[in-house]
Image (cartoon, helix red, strand yellow):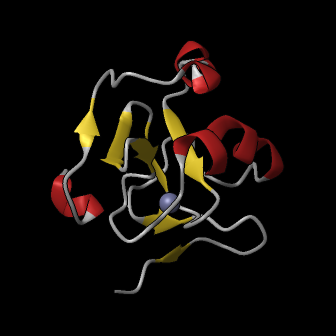
Amino acid sequence: MERTFGGPIVVGRARKPAKSAWFWQAREAHLWCSMCSRTFPNGTCRLADGEQHCPYADCDGLLSRDVSDWSSIRREHPNYPVAPWLGIQYPLNAPPQKVSR
Ligand SMILES: [Zn+2]
């Protein structure tokens, strides 16, 4: 799993600040990050500076600011899969493509 994200991550029920508690109530299976256009399982994040970040090591997205439910992305893009691939970019206005490293 950590190889997928490129760095150490936290999996499971991490403690959340109250302002973003809705993420856990929503029980989305997958979340989508607007900073890197990639998805990750709900409950996965990377802790840095006391904040919960997008789990991908090369992304500065914040869970409380930059992350959306995957289901709401799929409403706009019905061709996107129900279970998205990790590490694949799903841009809002272009077809999916592999992340180049
Ligand atoms: Zn990200």
Would residue 49 be seen by someone viewing this image from the given angle?
yes
Is 69 above or below relative to 24? below
Front residue (pair 49, 44) = 49
Is 54 above or below relative to 72? below
Is 3 above or below relative to 58? above
Q: Residue at x 40, y 86 (%)?
A: 100
Quadrant where the C terminus sits is bottom left
Q: Residue at x 19, y 53 (%)?
A: 8
Residue furthest to the bottom: 101
Would residue 69 be seen by someone viewing this image from the given angle?
no
Q: Residue at x 74, y 64 (%)?
A: 92
Q: Residue at x 64, y 59 (%)?
A: 34
Residue 16 position, x and y percent, is: 45, 24
The reply, left or right, for residue 51 in relation to residue 78 is left
Front residue (pair 95, 24) = 24
Quadrant location of residue 21? top right
Quadrant location of residue 35? bottom right
Residue 32 position, x and y percent, is: 58, 49
